[in-house]
Amino acid sequence: MIFDDLEIKKEEIVEEKEKKLSLFDVLNSLYSSKEIEFVDAEKAYNPYMINKFVSMNSDLIFLSNEMNINPFLSKRVQFDFYNSIIRKKKRYTKYLKAEKDDAIDIIKFYMKCSNEKAKDILRLLPEEQLTELKIKYKNEHI
């Protein structure tokens, strides 16, 4: 009897863990025919990130713009809008990241400055001096 109660509690814990949704689960439900309730998705729903990902699809950019024009709408209204308007099909969104520039890191190392200052210095620095700094940095850090 005690072991039966433990097994039931384990099943309840597993069910609770399965209910937690991520931002990507919400996006997939908006894009595909997999339906989820807003009550389950409320914690994972981040309007800024959802709008950002939706805007990365060329056929959905106008929908994202509509939500950006109306930022005062509640999460529920935004979710319902996207859920009812977006045509259900498989979409692949590649998240764009900023490129890492080694030259900025080298300038920060030698000049002991912030990212913004290093970007300003990079614009002013002649190409020859930049290559010298790169060679010097490479030799010192081997």
Image (spheres, grey):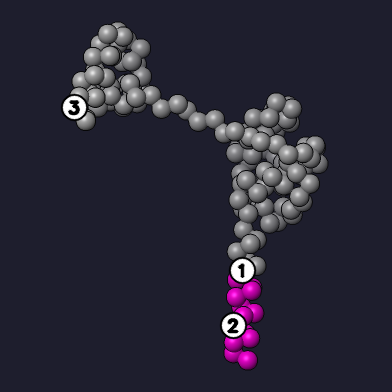
Magenta span: predominant SS is helix
Q: Position of residue 46 (x, y in %)?
A: 61, 44
Does label 1 or label 3 sit earlier along the sequence?
A: 1
Whole-Å distance between the Cαs marked 1 and 2? 12 Å
- Residue hosting label 3: 140
Crowding at mark 3 (Cα within 10 Å: few <14, some 14-19, many 20+): few
Residue 9, placed above or below residue 33 = below
Instruction: Decide whether residue 12 is among the magenta residues.
Output: yes
Residue 14 is tagged as 1
The image quadrant that residue 121 belongs to is top left
Amino acid on which disc 3 is placed: Glu
- Residue hosting label 2: 6
Amino acid on which disc 2 is placed: Leu
Residue 43, placed above or below residue 71 = below
Q: Position of residue 90 (x, y in %)?
A: 73, 39
At 50% from the left and 31% from the top, the residue drawn is 97
Total numbered labels: 3
Does label 3 or label 2 sit earlier along the sequence?
A: 2
Between residues 93 and 60, which one lies in front from this camera angle? 93
- Circle 2 sits in a helix, a strand or a loop, which is it? helix
Farthest residue, direction bottom: 1
